[in-house]
């Protein structure tokens, strides 16, 4: 097994980077990284991460070569693994993705509905460039991708670079199953959940518990119906998504849904409750981003005592992608939920959809696990509309087609009519000038 690995974090200015790096460094025995390249288009944000990571590694007595760069050639040449989490347009554009749809009475969300599409268009532009650079400068490297919105990104990469060495992952499904296990007091390590869907759009239909040797999903659903789903930690908006997850179970007690389905199944209420002048992007800027900025300033100027108060936790987000990298690097063949071309994994869904299903990861890459049953008409219908809408959006990007873009919006389940679809599309085109290709 290769030692002295070089990795690159693309989109290193992200607030998630210190956590991902701490996860990676804590697993040195299985994943012996000796050099980390921090790469971002924003020199300022990249440098902020550099200073924080340098400080954290010194605090933990870790010896690592750390490089910061805005040059893709320097970033990728000779690297073994690339961890990508770019956010095209940054949090400022996320704010518009959330606020513009709300102005039209539509769900305004980072990855769902038309806001997610707006982000998707920016992401396709920048992410395909990134993949091209990775293939040019590091043709043997694996890309471990967290870049959102993941179904759109995966669909676009599959069309443009069908043989790219890329693994698309999202921490949401594991984060939900861990949270549910914690709430109802199960041992998550003994769980083998069956989850299927699209990214941020799926369901658990079985939770095999090795310790108890049975499927515990029916008893969890019962408890969720009786007690609700109450999260003890985290911020209010995540807590609310779990309450809503419980409410979705009340209505449809055949599965455990992904929280994000609230934007499709109860979008009217989400819109009614939203504050159109202060959305999640504002919260993230005022909290996570601000915390990182304060940490950075404290390192530059502060006393040792000030600094001790700061940490950037090694949480599920970082752990999950590190586990995937290790399964790949050490050929462990472990099971994860990943975003892959369907090709029959969900037997009664169109085979050219990009789906999120369990899959094994070994040195030779990803092997999806096919479901042993067909999915219900309810799930299938929801997914088919979503897949078609996303495919039209990806077509709109490749063909620079306004017609396809308008069809994508009109078909989206968060949009009530072609009239609203056109208005919001035109507003988003205006707001994304310079980021989107021109749609004709
Ligand atoms: C989860 C999802 C990510 C998403 C993030 C948003 O981790 O899997 O895809 O970007 O939540 O969290 P935030 O705190 O930025 O709203
Ligand atoms: Mn995600």
Image: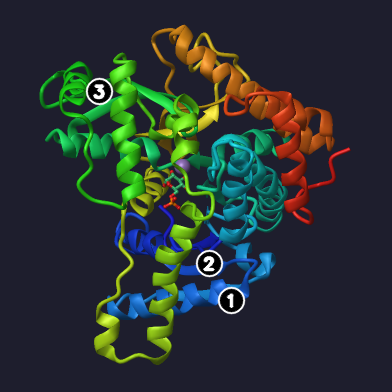
Viewer-nearest of discs 3 and 1:
1
Q: Which element carries disc 2, helix, strand or loop?
A: loop
Mark 3, other Cα within 10 Å: few <14 / some 14–19 / many ≥20: many
* Residue 102 point in image, percent of width and height: 58, 42
Q: Residue at x 76, y 33 (%)?
A: 422
Estimate the spatial distance between the alpha carbons at disc 1 and disc 2, rounded to whole Å: 8 Å
Q: Which element carries disc 3, helix, strand or loop?
A: strand
Given residues 417 and 34, the one toward you in this image is 417
* Residue 429 point in image, percent of width and height: 77, 46
Q: Classify mark 1 as within 8 Å of ligand 1 or not, answering yes or no.
A: no
| Relative to 419, 173 lies left or right | left
Instruction: Work out whether residue 68 can be spotted.
Output: yes
Q: Is residue 8 above or below residue 397?
A: below
| Relative to 204, 416 lies left or right | right
Given residues 220 and 358, the one toward you in this image is 220
| Relative to 332, 183 lies left or right | left
Instruction: Work out whether residue 4 can be spotted.
Output: no
Earlier sequence position, callout 3 versus callout 1: 1
Circles 1 and 2: CB distance less than 8 Å? yes
* Residue 165 point in image, percent of width and height: 59, 42
Quarter of the image where one finds residue 160: top right
Earlier sequence position, callout 1 versus callout 2: 2
Q: Residue at x 78, y 54 (%)?
A: 433
Q: Which residue is mark 1?
A: 44
Q: Residue at x 35, y 90 (%)?
A: 302
Q: Residue at x 53, y 43 (%)?
A: 109
Q: Which residue is mark 2?
A: 13
Q: Which residue is mark 3?
A: 207
């Amino acid at each position: 097994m290769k030692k002295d690995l070089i990795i690159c974090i693309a989109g290193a200015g992200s607030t998630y980077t210190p956590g991902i790096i701490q996860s990676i460094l804590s697993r040195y025995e299985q994943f012996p990284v000796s050099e980390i390249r921090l790469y971002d288009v924003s020199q300022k944000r990249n440098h902020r991460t550099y200073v924080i990571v340098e400080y954290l590694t010194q605090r933990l007595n870790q010896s690592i070569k750390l490089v910061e760069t805005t040059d893709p050639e320097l970033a990728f040449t000779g690297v073994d693994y690339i961890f990508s989490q770019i956010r095209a347009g940054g949090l400022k554009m996320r704010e518009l993705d959330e606020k513009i749809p709300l102005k039209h009475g539509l769900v305004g969300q980072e990855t769902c509905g038309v806001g997610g599409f707006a982000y998707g268009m920016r992401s396709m532009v920048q992410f395909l460039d990134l993949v091209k650079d990775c293939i040019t400068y590091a043709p043997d490297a694996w890309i471990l991708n967290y870049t959102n919105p993941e179904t759109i990104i995966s669909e676009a990469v599959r069309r443009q670079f069908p043989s790219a060495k890329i693994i698309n992952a999202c921490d949401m499904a594991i984060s939900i199953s861990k949270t549910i296990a914690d709430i109802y007091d199960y041992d998550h390590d003994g769980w083998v959940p069956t989850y299927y869907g699209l990214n941020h759009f799926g369901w658990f239909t079985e939770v095999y518990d090795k310790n108890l040797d049975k499927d515990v999903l029916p008893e969890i659903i019962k408890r969720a119906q009786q007690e609700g789903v109450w999260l003890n930690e985290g911020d209010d908006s995540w807590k609310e998504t779990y309450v809503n997850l419980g409410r979705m179970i009340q209505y449809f007690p055949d599965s455990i849904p992904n929280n994000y389905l609230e934007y499709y199944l109860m979008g009217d209420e989400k819109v009614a409750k939203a504050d159109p002048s202060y959305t999640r992007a504002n919260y993230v800027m005022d909290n996570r981003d601000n915390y990182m900025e304060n940490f950075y300033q404290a390192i530059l100027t502060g006393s040792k005592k000030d600094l001790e108060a700061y940490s950037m936790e090694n949480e599920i987000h970082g752990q999950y992608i590190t586990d995937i990298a290790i399964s790949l690097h050490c050929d462990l063949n472990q099971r994860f939920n990943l975003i892959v071309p369907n090709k029959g994994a969900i037997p009664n869904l169109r085979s050219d959809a990009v789906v999120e299903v369990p899959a094994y990861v070994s040195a030779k890459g990803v092997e999806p696990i096919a479901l042993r049953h067909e999915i219900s008409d309810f799930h299938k219908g929801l997914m088919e509309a979503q897949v078609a809408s996303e495919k039209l959006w990806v077509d709109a990007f490749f063909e620079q087609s306004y017609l396809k873009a308008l069809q994508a919006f009109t078909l989206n389940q968060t949009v009530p009519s072609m009239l609203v679809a056109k208005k919001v599309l035109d507003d988003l085109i205006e707001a994304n000038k310079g980021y989107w290709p021109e749609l004709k």
